[in-house]
Amino acid sequence: MDMDELMAQANALQEKVAAAQDKLAQMHVKGIAENGACIIDMTGKYDLIDITIREDVLSKGASFVSSIVATAYRDAKSKADELIDKVMGEATEGVPMPE
């Protein structure tokens, strides 16, 4: 493989990855805790969009609220991780990687 061909492949990969990152920025995942007591909405790039906490949960104290927010965040992050793997996998599919 000559250098021009290698550079063309690198540029094509860079464009696909950039497009995949743009796509991830537009996609949303929701993390849910305690049957919807807390819902976190984030993009596929981990940008926080919104946190919703049911009113009845607030009376359970700061420790409980903190706990369900953390649980909802972990759920959202896990879903975003899966989304990133899928979208980036599709973007790099068929691209020969150096060994």
Image: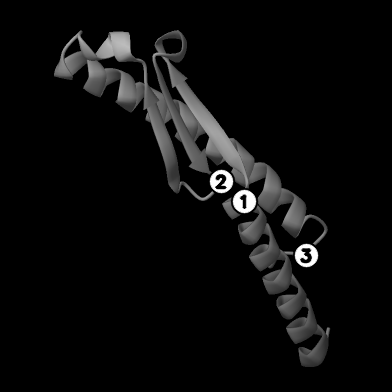
Answer left or right for 51 relative to 94.
Answer: left
- For badge 3, the amino acid type reads Pro
Which of discs 3 and 1 lies nearer the camera? The answer is 1
Q: Judge whether 47 appears above or below 29 on screen.
A: below
Q: Which mark is residue 96?
A: 3
Q: Residues within 10 Å of mark 2 (few under 14, many from 20)?
A: many
- Give whichever of discs 2 and 1 has the lower sequence position: 1
Q: Residues within 10 Å of mark 3 (few under 14, many from 20)?
A: few
- Give whichever of discs 3 and 1 has the lower sequence position: 1
Q: Judge whether 31 appears above or below 5 on screen.
A: above
Q: Does dot 1 land on a helix, a strand or a loop?
A: helix
Q: Is residue 33 visible?
A: yes
Answer left or right for 66 relative to 69.
Answer: left
58 or 24: nearer the viewer:
58
Q: Residue at x 20, y 9 (%)?
A: 59
- For badge 2, the amino acid type reads Gly
Q: Which mark is residue 26?
A: 1
Farthest left residue?
62
The structure's colour scheme is: one colour
Q: Is residue 99 visible?
A: no
Q: Does dot 3 land on a helix, a strand or a loop?
A: loop
- In percent of width and height, residue 42 lies at 49, 40
Which of discs 2 and 3 lies nearer the camera? The answer is 2
* Residue 23 quadrant: bottom right
- For badge 1, the amino acid type reads Gln
Q: Does dot 2 land on a helix, a strand or a loop?
A: loop
- In percent of width and height, residue 90 lies at 76, 51
42 or 94: nearer the viewer:
42
Return the residue at label 2: 44
